Image (cartoon, coloured by chain):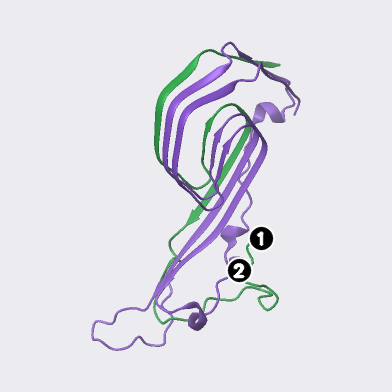
Amino acid sequence: MIRFHVTNHSLAVGQIEVLGVSSASMLQVGDTDNVMLYSMFDTPPESVIVGPLAPFPSPEGADTAIGESNVQDD
Amino acid sequence: MSKMTSASFPPRTSQVGVLCIISAASAAAVQLGDRGETRAKLRALAVQRQEDHTESGNVYFESYPLFRRPYPVLRDPVAESGALIETRFENAEPCIRVGCIRIIAAGNASSVQIGNGKLVSGDSRIKHIRQYPKQQPDGQSPDGQDKET
């Protein structure tokens, strides 16, 4: 049995200056029970393609897929 | 996993004097008030290439496993062993006070909130692709060989 007991006393902050809240991050003034934040960022090695300009490979079932405009589907 | 949670009592309120945000874009949420659940999600293919999409073909999310990748699993041996966890929060002071918040930009499935929440979930997946022809030192046009790296 684990007991986790928190007592929150006075919390007062003068000023918060943030340059950017980026890629699945959060800034909150308040309480939250559960936080799950994931960010995946992929740049190299396939990001740099040096060579003749060829079309990108089409995925399986590309004929039926709508492509980059089809963002709402999983 | 057995869990006993008594919600924090009394719930704290947040008082903010000034909130100044210049930009909130790409599945960003700005909220003043309480919230049950947030599920922000962003998928992006950032393509930079010399030719336009009509010539070089379409780009598909399905081509890249990054967009199918499952979430990493958080392993908690204490919770997996079935131990009872009792959490208790007491708020001696009913207010969180902040004078001034200045944010230049919030983007990519992010959340800015003044108030309480229950669940915040954010998922951002971005894949960068840069495609450009190789510069030949002798000024000849690129050969037909595949030079993908």
Closer to the camera, B123 or A19? A19
1 and 2 marks on the same chain: yes
Hue used for the chain lettered A: green
Hue used for the chain lettered B: purple
SS for tag 2? loop
Give the image location of residue B66, x and y in percent. Answer: 57, 58
What subunit carries mark 2?
A
Closer to the camera, A17 or A3? A17
Closer to the camera, B54 or B83? B54
Looking at the figure, which quarter contains the N terminus of chain B? top right
SS for tag 1? loop
Q: Residues within 10 Å of mark 1 (few under 14, many from 20)?
A: few
Determine whether, in the image, residue B115 is placed left or right of residue B80: left
Determine whether, in the image, residue B139 is placed left or right of residue B68: left
Using the image, determine if residue A70 lies above or below residue A57.
Answer: above
Kind of residue at badge 1 = Gln
Kind of residue at badge 2 = Ser
Q: Residue A69 — which label?
A: 2
Give the image location of residue A55, x and y in percent. Answer: 51, 80
Furthest residue to the top?
B92
Furthest residue to the left?
B138
Kindly identify the residue that appears in the image at 50 percent across and 51 percent down: B25
Kindly identify which residue carries mark 1. Answer: A72
